[in-house]
Image: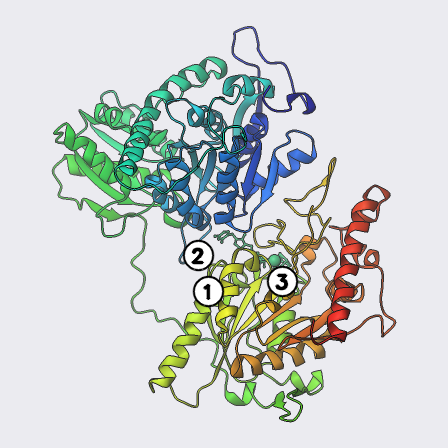
């Protein structure tokens, strides 16, 4: 076999008596089935980045890897753009490649997708569909999918978990077929299909799958054949570019024929046959509803009821939308009087969603009289019930009977109450409530900042910027951490929160816990966004449009994950030295999406994408030293802090504010506890972060105009503890104390020591 079959666990025999390969019946979700197909194929590599609702696919694969069910190389990328880059690089190197994403993750990688199809390197991408921001909504619609229609990848649809499995297997053959050689998308509905378990069958033995997908076709050029060096992606102008596109276009059209051949072959081994269009009761239908994916099953049930009443209704649900199966659509609709295209996304201002345009174009070619209605439905994961399908068919009936219905409309929205005005429940903070507590002065002779912080008790009189009532888990360290920091900030504040736990737990329309102005932007771009806001503040002030006396401190709050995917914009803002603060709360993972590893997750820690067991001993590479990276941009102020050392943190906050007002960008990382995903007691947060400091894993220091000062040295205080004293406090790290993980622990301790010794040297020497 192409791929290390012999080393992997086997799970049954291949064929039964009928020639249909033996299958296991189970109860599984779409994401589980995508992972199972990928594991059975045993791709060479998966590049991935977590985003709900597709994240589970990588998580399941990580768990399965620990169990020895596959040996796919799993590469955690810095963002979806990076994940797509990893996948492209792996595909040009000639191996089999897999990925999964959703929503803004898909949009974030979109720019890479035509690169891959235009240079004709196959792979399979699962798009678990979800609404695109903004506003942020994590549930399923097709607004992401429609952006994929023009990237040159064939698109297969999977309306239920069974189809997710089958399409994933067929997709790879399609992608690698000699007449196609294109990357392929398999799209299933977020949550409806990805998370709901259904009865499914899968091949009991991976060998059955590997026989179907076959050896990787050889004879294609790749980047690793040193005897035949090739140039991949040369600059190409006319006349060649248009020829390249023409060939790509032909290959895409060919995909419909090849899909039909492959599904025929697949039916023989599985007993399941997929046509390009799944047609239900369409033979003599007069009215029809056209729906993508999961909603189509609901409509089929309604067809049965209508048929019982003598109404000739049918459903069209495509299994493939790229290429768009025009001939099959024309055939299906040739006698239909009214077709309603239900769209889970709109092409704004286009009088439809994309499927409407394509169905209309197909009908126009055959001069059909068929009336086409569009109804935008189910946005942001709004359920599609039988009553909704009934309403769609009723519209078809009414239109067939001559009623003049709008060709384009929304279904399921509410007019709202125009009388109801949102109440301002949280009163704006006054200057007195937020000013006069902490002071910072520059000593002109020494150039040092002198900070006066009153006792913590006195600071309780200072108003909080966050109201109680957010939805964080018990013991979550984000809010004590951020609030302690904000205690050191005087006056008016505008905050920008990047996506993450702090953001989702403080806002949920129509509620907000923020007493000050709050902006959200996606976590790959918050720093750039706040730079724009800061610059506009200064420019409008200069033009006299804002009171000259007004003075706002701009604070971006981000998780550690936001400093992975958003690192580029953060460094950009730092290099431009905008007058703002970036405050990173580090909980050592992507907690909002279910505790996947981030680059700040330390070596050996267990997360949902760095499981422990078998060959795997948790995260395989060291934590990112973000403060040092930010310090290398030469911004005026960098610091680390934790709520466990509150006075130290408040003092640093005051300095950060001073620098953000007078000199430029200040960046700080605070370590905060996530009891839920650290698998620790709710009330253990402070003890754990305190131990992280005392073990020198998380030293408290600042870099002020290039000069490093350790602000708390556990060695000098006789408080230093071994790393194991910190690690033993969390369920996610307890394994590191077992003898079998000794090497991993040693590697970690050595890295902690190396960074600590280097930091002490910097503290000693202002030139370092
Ligand atoms: C482009 C894009 N990719 C992925 C996501 C999914 N996502 C939202 S929050 C998040 C994790 C954030 O991690 P971090 O910044 O550490 O904050 P935490 O959740 O730990 O508070 C992820 C992966 C997204 N919203 N947008
Ligand atoms: S998952 Fe962790 S970081 Fe997120 S709200 Fe819960 S405790 Fe806080
Ligand atoms: Mg985090």
Looking at the image, which residue is at 28% across and 25% down?
A: 307
Sequence order check: which comes first, mark 1 or mark 3?
Answer: 1
Q: Nearer the viewer, residue 285 or 6?
A: 6
Ligand 1 is located in which of the four quadrants?
bottom right
Q: Quadrant of residue 149?
A: top left
Pointers 2 and 1 in contact (C-beta within 8 Å) = yes
Q: Is residue 57 above or below residue 623?
A: above
Sequence order check: which comes first, mark 3 or mark 2?
Answer: 2
Q: Residues within 10 Å of mark 2 (few under 14, many from 20)?
A: some
Residue carrying label 2: 136
SS at mark 3 in the image: helix
For the N terminus, the quadrant is top right
x%, y% of residue 122?
A: 45, 31
Q: Residue furthest right?
A: 718
Q: Mark 3 to mark 2: distance in Å? A: 27 Å
The yes-or-no answer for disc 2 within 8 Å of ligand 1 is yes
Looking at the image, which residue is at 31% across and 30% down?
A: 247
Residue carrying label 1: 520
Residue carrying label 3: 626
Looking at the image, which residue is at 37% across and 37% down?
A: 118
Q: Mark 1 to mark 3: distance in Å? A: 22 Å
x%, y% of residue 490?
A: 56, 84
x%, y% of residue 62?
A: 63, 38
SS at mark 1 in the image: strand
């Amino acid at each position: 076999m192409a791929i290390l079959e012999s080393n992997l666990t086997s799970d049954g025999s291949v064929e039964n008596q009928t020639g249909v390969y033996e299958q296991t019946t189970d109860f599984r979700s779409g994401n589980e089935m995508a992972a199972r197909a990928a594991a059975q194929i045993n791709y060479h590599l998966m590049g991935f980045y977590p985003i709900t609702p597709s994240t589970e696919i990588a998580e399941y694969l990580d768990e399965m890897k620990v169990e020895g069910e596959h040996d796919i190389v799993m590469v955690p990328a810095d963002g979806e753009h990076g994940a797509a880059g990893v996948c492209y690089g792996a595909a040009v190197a000639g191996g089999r490649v897999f990925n999964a994403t959703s929503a803004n993750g898909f949009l974030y990688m979109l720019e890479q997708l035509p690169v891959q199809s235009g240079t004709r390197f196959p792979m399979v991408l699962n798009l678990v569909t979800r609404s695109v921001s903004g506003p942020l909504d994590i549930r399923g619609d097709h607004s992401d999918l429609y952006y994929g229609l023009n990237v040159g990848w064939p698109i297969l649809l999977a309306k239920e978990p069974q189809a997710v499995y089958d399409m994933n297997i067929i997709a790879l053959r399609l992608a690698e077929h000699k007449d196609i050689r294109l990357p392929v998308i398999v799209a299933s509905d977020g949550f409806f299909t990805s998370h709901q378990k259904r009865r499914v069958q899968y091949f009991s033995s991976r060998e059955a799958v590997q026989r179907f997908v076959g050896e990787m076709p050889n004879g294609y050029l790749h980047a690793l054949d040193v005897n035949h060096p090739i140039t991949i992606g040369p600059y190409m102008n006319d006349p060649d570019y248009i020829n390249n596109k023409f060939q790509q276009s032909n290959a895409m059209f060919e995909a419909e024929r090849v899909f039909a051949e492959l599904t025929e072959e697949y039916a023989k081994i599985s007993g399941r046959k997929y046509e390009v269009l799944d047609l239900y009761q369409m033979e003599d239908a007069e009215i029809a509803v056209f729906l993508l994916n999961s909603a189509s099953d609901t409509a089929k049930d309604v067809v049965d009821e209508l048929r019982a009443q003598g109404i000739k209704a049918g459903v069209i649900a495509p299994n493939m939308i790229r290429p768009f199966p025009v001939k099959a659509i024309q055939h299906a609709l040739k006698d239909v009087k009214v077709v309603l295209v239900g769209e889970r996304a709109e092409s704004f201002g286009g009088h439809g969603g994309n499927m409407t345009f394509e169905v209309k174009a197909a009908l126009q070619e055959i001069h059909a009289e068929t009336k086409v209605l569009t109804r935008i439905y189910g946005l942001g994961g709004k359920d599609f019930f039988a009553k909704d399908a009934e309403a769609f068919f009723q519209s078809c009936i009414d239109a067939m009977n001559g009623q003049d219905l709008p060709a384009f409309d929304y279904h399921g929205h509410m007019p709202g109450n125009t009388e109801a005005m949102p109440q301002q429940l949280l009163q704006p903070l006054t200057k007195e409530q937020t000013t006069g507590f902490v002071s910072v002065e520059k000593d002109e002779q020494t150039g040092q900042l002198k900070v006066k912080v009153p006792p913590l008790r006195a600071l309780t009189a200072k108003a909080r910027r966050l109201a109680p009532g957010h939805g964080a888990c018990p013991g979550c360290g984000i809010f004590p951490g951020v609030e302690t920091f904000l205690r050191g900030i005087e006056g008016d504040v505008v905050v920008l929160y990047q996506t993450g736990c702090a953001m989702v737990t403080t806002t949920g329309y129509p509620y907000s816990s923020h007493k000050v102005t709050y902006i959200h932007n996606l976590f790959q771009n918050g720093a750039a966004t706040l730079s724009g806001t800061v610059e506009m503040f200064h420019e409008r002030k200069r033009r006299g449009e804002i009171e000259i006396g007004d003075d706002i401190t701009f604070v971006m709050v981000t998780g550690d994950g936001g400093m992975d995917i958003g690192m580029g914009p953060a460094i950009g803002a730092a290099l431009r030295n905008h007058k703002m603060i970036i405050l990173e709360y580090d909980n050592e993972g992507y907690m909002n999406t279910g505790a996947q590893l981030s680059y700040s997750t330390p070596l050996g820690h267990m997360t949902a994408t760095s499981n422990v067991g078998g060959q795997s001993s948790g995260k395989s590479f060291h934590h990112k030293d973000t403060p040092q990276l930010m310090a290398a941009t030469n911004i005026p102020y960098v610091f680390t802090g934790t709520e466990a050392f509150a006075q130290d943190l408040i003092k640093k906050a005051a300095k950060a504010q001073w620098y953000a007002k007078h000199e430029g960008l200040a960046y700080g990382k605070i370590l905060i506890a996530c009891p839920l995903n650290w698998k620790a007691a709710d009330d253990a947060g402070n003890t754990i972060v305190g131990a992280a400091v005392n073990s020198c894993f998380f030293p408290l220091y600042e870099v002020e105009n290039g000069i490093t000062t350790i602000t708390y040295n556990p060695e000098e205080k006789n408080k230093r503890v071994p790393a194991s004293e910190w690690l033993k406090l969390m369920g996610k790290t307890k394994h590191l104390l077992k003898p079998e993980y000794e090497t991993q622990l040693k590697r970690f301790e050595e890295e902690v020591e190396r960074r600590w010794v280097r930091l002490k040297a910097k503290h000693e020497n202002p030139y370092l």
